[in-house]
Amino acid sequence: MDFKKVVCTVLAALTAACVFTACGGDSDSAASSSAVQSNDNADNEKADVSATADKLKSDIEFEDELVEFDSAKIEKILGISADKYTSAKVYVSSSGGTPEEIDCFEAVDESAAADIKAALETRVDNQKNTFTDYRPEQAPKLDSPVIKVNGNCVYMCISGDNSKAEEIIG
């Protein structure tokens, strides 16, 4: 019985370590692995997508804790398949009690960027329907989310500080 507890504890610690290190990542290994797939300009944009998401998360005050989605959740919840982007970082409300969210993608091309933007707009519409009934005091955050497309990069931020989000996204 004690052996099982030790194994479970070790596995839980390893899982937590993987989750927390995935947020920061090793920029050298990320750059070298992405260099195989694309050119140097795309590598810089990828770094910017991740850095932008992290800056939004750190510089804007969110009511709820935000957690990062992996590619499976991005596809399941947002409807954006991994073949549409080369890099993504998505943070959502951990409790689901707020519509607060950060979505930053580098799309594979302009067509995919348009598809990602459309999927994010659909996400906002769905969230409006949910929060209007569920938590009406949170619904105003969905009235004017920041959604921007810069080249192949698509950004969305739903927060209580749109001006700060606009400033960070640029």
Image: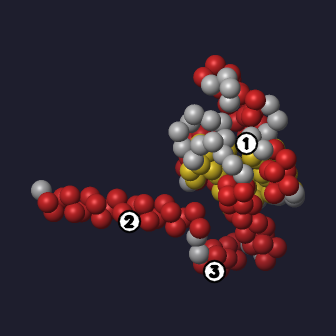
Q: Is residue 87 left or right of residue 166?
A: left
- The quarter holding residue 127 reads top right
Distance, label 3 to label 1, CA atoms, is 31 Å
Q: Residue at x 70, y 36 (%)?
A: 123
For discs 1 and 2, the disc positioned in front in the rendered view: 1
Residue 24 in percent (x, y) is at 59, 67
Q: Quadrant of the N terminus?
A: bottom left
Task: Answer with mark 3 or mark 2, whichever residue precedes in sequence.
Answer: 2
Residue at disc 2, secondary structure: helix
Q: Amino acid at mark 1?
A: Ser
Position of residue 50 measured from the top left corner of the image (x, y, whole percent): 69, 63
Looking at marks 3 and 1 on the same chain, the residue that comes earlier in the sequence is marked by 3
| Residue depicted at x 78% and y 44% | 161
Q: Are marks 3 and 2 in contact (CB under 8 Å)?
A: no
**Residue under pointer 3:** 28
Q: Residues within 10 Å of mark 2 (few under 14, many from 20)?
A: few
User: Any mark on residue 14, and which?
Assistant: 2
Element type at mark 1:
loop
